[in-house]
Amino acid sequence: NAGVTQTPKFRVLKTGQSMTLLCAQDMNHEYMYWYRQDPGMGLRLIHYSVGEGTTAKGEVPDGYNVSRLKKQNFLLGLESAAPSQTSVYFCASRGSGRENEFFGPGTRLTVL
Amino acid sequence: QQQVKQSPQSLIVQKGGISIINCAYENTAFDYFPWYQQFPGKGPALLIAIRPDVSEKKEGRFTISFNKSAKQFSLHIMDSQPGDSATYFCAASKGTGANNLFFGTGTRLTVIP
């Protein structure tokens, strides 16, 4: 039981490049989330999903796209990376009950 | 704007002392108030949570105090230990929709031996 895993752990991009972050959970959770964490700003919700095949925008969705083709995976895409997207990205999944939310270890992304 | 306001930004406490972190909110639709603990290089982990039907919840050395009329809640860490040194986030969510969490800006706690 690995919980929530994120791939990759670190990445450096140049402005304009694209990439996809992968989140996987093995807890059969319906809800999955992508957050970004920036110094002094806490965690802010980018996009979320309430089930396979569904996605919705969070607080800061601009510049990101997501897909949830399989229940266990939630992908976050950056089509054209910008320096403002330099951040630490966390994925989380949640089962029934709001106390049942677990975070992944994070992906540190730097955009030059 | 920040839906949950957290203070202080950083806190230094002697070992054995009490650490207190405060949060305030405006949205009266919030009905779930968790605290998360995050160690460097790790993801946040749920520490303790409270709902507005109680004014206090205690788990070991960690206590949440909740003041519904003032729309404030706080985390108290009794007998603080160096192993408690971490960043703490308060959060809040509503009981409707996807129950998305709104986080405070975090408090970096350092417990000095």
Image (tube, coloured by chain):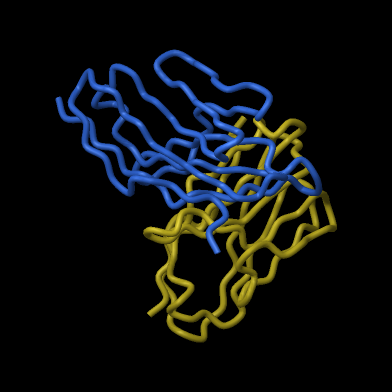
Camera-side residue: A94 or A97?
A97
Where A82 sits versus A19, above or below? Answer: below
Q: Position of residue B8 (x, y in %)?
A: 33, 45
Q: Residue at x 21, y 37 (%)?
A: B12
As drawn, the chain in blue is: B
User: Farthest bottom residue?
Assistant: A16
- Give the residue furthest to the front: B69
Query: Chain A's colour?
Result: yellow
x%, y% of residue B86?
33, 37
Q: Nearer the viewer, residue B72 or B103?
A: B72
Q: Is residue A69 above or below residue B37?
A: below
Which residue lies at the image location 54% right of the left edge and 29% below the top edge? B66
In the picture, the quarter occupied by the C terminus of chain B is top left
In the displayed structure image, the side of residue A112 where residue A36 appears, left or right: right
Q: Quadrant of residue B92?
A: top right
Q: Which quadrant would the N terminus of chain B be assigned to in this image? A: bottom right
- The x and y percentages for residue B44 are 48, 41
Say if A2 sits above or below A13 in the image. Answer: above
Q: Identify the residue shown where x is 46% and y is 42%.
A: B89
Please state if B17 lies on the left or on the right of A110 as rendered.
Answer: left
| Residue occupying the point 47% across, 43% down | B43
Would you place residue B108 above or below residue A2 in this image? Answer: below
Count of numbered circles on the image: 0
